[in-house]
Image (cartoon, helix red, strand yellow):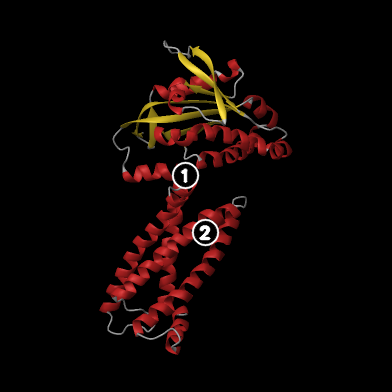
């Protein structure tokens, strides 16, 4: 069974937490092993590593990392998104202190029992646990967990700003050398944005943009799209061609974006006195993709398909259409019951010498 684009994206965001905690676990476990081996008298609160305890500790730490990733990305970020940075820090600190306390309460007795070869009901296990919580060993364990937490949250913050797929591409060096590939592009531009900005003022218009992009996000995620750029009130979404064509994902995305904005129209009206809408153009074609930049690295797409898509989107006003599709993409999409493609005939795109047939997408 294939995973949905949303599930794949969620896993792509959570799995690095487990990897980071796993790697830090190896550093800390090896350090602890070297320390306990070199000490003549090992404190009762320290667990001497055996192969079985090492495997248990590695597994436990990795699972904790995955749990932290799931809680952070699926719960805490959503619940705390509207609060100030100070409130977020206090709330997260309190949460993780409790979480890590529970983790140590569960894992230390198991490791101690394994080391002593006794059951969890043995009173000596719980005597060691009590001593562990008030010992330097317990403090050291807490510092190790805090270090892993900070490293994983730092990674998550970078991934949030760059996008998990873009960061993964940087780390794997996928586009270190330019690659030719076929992609689908969607250019969407808010209607009457200048008038709305003048009406609301810069600060309120910026807040509207934040809510506007939030309203469009689910459609992009569920279609497997990647946000290439935000340019003012314009959003550029891209798919590898196979992913954009699969189950008509690119068309479903833009129509879902329209529907989600309509569903939140009352919210926009109540908060800003206006319900935004957009016009969009889509096209497919070859691109060259690679890392570029001297002072700031970015993964950049170049190719005529981007120019075509931007100019197709600009034709929406002339033809009183909300969504236009170029001929190359239309030829690869086929038909679908949920919408129709109405040909507008060959169009001369600005700056181009060859006409491109353009199609209006009309929901059934």
As drawn, is 198 to the left or to the right of 116? right
Q: Mark 2 highlights which residue?
A: 71
Residue 229: tell me if it is visible: no
Identify which residue is drawn at 38% across, 45% down.
Answer: 168
Q: Residue at x 67, y 28 (%)?
A: 196
Residue sitting at x 35%, y 85%: 116
Report if residue 12 is visible in the image: yes
Q: Nearer the viewer, residue 81 or 359?
A: 359
Instruction: Report which quarter residue 36 is drawn in.
Output: bottom left
Disc nearest the viewer among 2 and 1: 1
Where in the figure is residue 247, as x and y percent of width and height? 47, 36
Upstream in sequence: badge 2 or badge 1? 1
Across and down, in percent, residue 317 comes to: 60, 18
| Viewer-closest of 228 and 153 | 228
Residue 192 found in image quarter: top right
**In terms of secondary structure, where does tag 1 sit?**
helix
Residue identified by numbered label 1: 5
Which residue is situated farthest in the left direction here? 38
Name the secondary structure under disc 2: helix
Q: Going 39% across and 81% down the picture, which residue do you hit?
A: 112
Q: Quadrant of the C terminus?
A: top right
Cβ atoms under marks 2 and 1 closer than 8 Å = no
Dot 1 alpha-carbon crowd within 10 angstroms: few under 14, some 14 to 19, many 20 or more = some
- Give the quarter of the image for residue 274: top right
Q: Where's residue 358, x and y in %?
A: 50, 18
């Amino acid at each position: 069974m294939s995973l949905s684009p949303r599930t794949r994206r969620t896993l792509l965001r959570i799995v690095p937490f487990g990897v980071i905690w796993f790697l830090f676990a190896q550093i800390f476990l090896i350090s602890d092993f070297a320390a306990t081996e070199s000490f003549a008298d090992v404190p009762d609160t320290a667990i001497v590593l055996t192969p079985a305890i090492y495997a248990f500790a590695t597994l436990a730490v990795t699972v904790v990392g995955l749990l932290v990733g799931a809680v952070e990305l699926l719960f805490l970020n959503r619940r705390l998104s509207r609060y100030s940075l100070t409130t977020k820090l206090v709330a997260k600190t309190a949460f993780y202190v409790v979480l890590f306390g529970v983790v140590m309460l569960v894992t230390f007795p198991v490791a101690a029992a394994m080391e002593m070869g006794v059951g969890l009901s043995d009173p000596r296990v719980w005597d060691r646990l009590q001593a562990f919580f008030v010992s330097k060993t317990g403090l050291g364990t807490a510092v190790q967990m805090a270090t892993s937490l900070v490293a994983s949250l730092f990674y998550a913050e970078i991934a949030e700003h760059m996008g998990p797929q873009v960061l993964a591409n940087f780390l794997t060096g996928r586009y270190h050398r330019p690659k030719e590939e076929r992609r689908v592009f969607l250019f969407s531009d808010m209607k009457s944005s200048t008038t709305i900005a003048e009406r609301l003022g810069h600060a309120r218009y910026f807040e509207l943009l934040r809510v506007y992009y939030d309203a469009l996000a689910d459609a992009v995620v569920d279609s497997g799209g990647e946000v290439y750029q935000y340019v003012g009130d314009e959003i550029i979404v891209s798919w590898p061609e196979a992913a954009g064509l699969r189950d008509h994902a690119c068309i479903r995305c833009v129509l879902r974006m329209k529907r989600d904005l309509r569903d939140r129209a009352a919210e926009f009206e109540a908060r800003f006195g206006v319900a935004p809408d957009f016009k969009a153009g889509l096209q497919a074609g070859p691109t060259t993709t690679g890392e570029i930049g001297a002072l700031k690295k970015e993964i950049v797409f170049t190719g005529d398909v981007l120019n075509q898509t931007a100019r197709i989107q600009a034709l929406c006003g002339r033809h009183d259409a909300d969504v236009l599709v170029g001929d190359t993409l239309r030829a690869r999409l086929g038909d679908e019951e949920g919408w129709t493609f109405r040909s507008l005939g060959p169009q001369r795109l600005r700056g181009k010498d060859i006409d491109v047939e353009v199609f209006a997408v009309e929901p059934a």
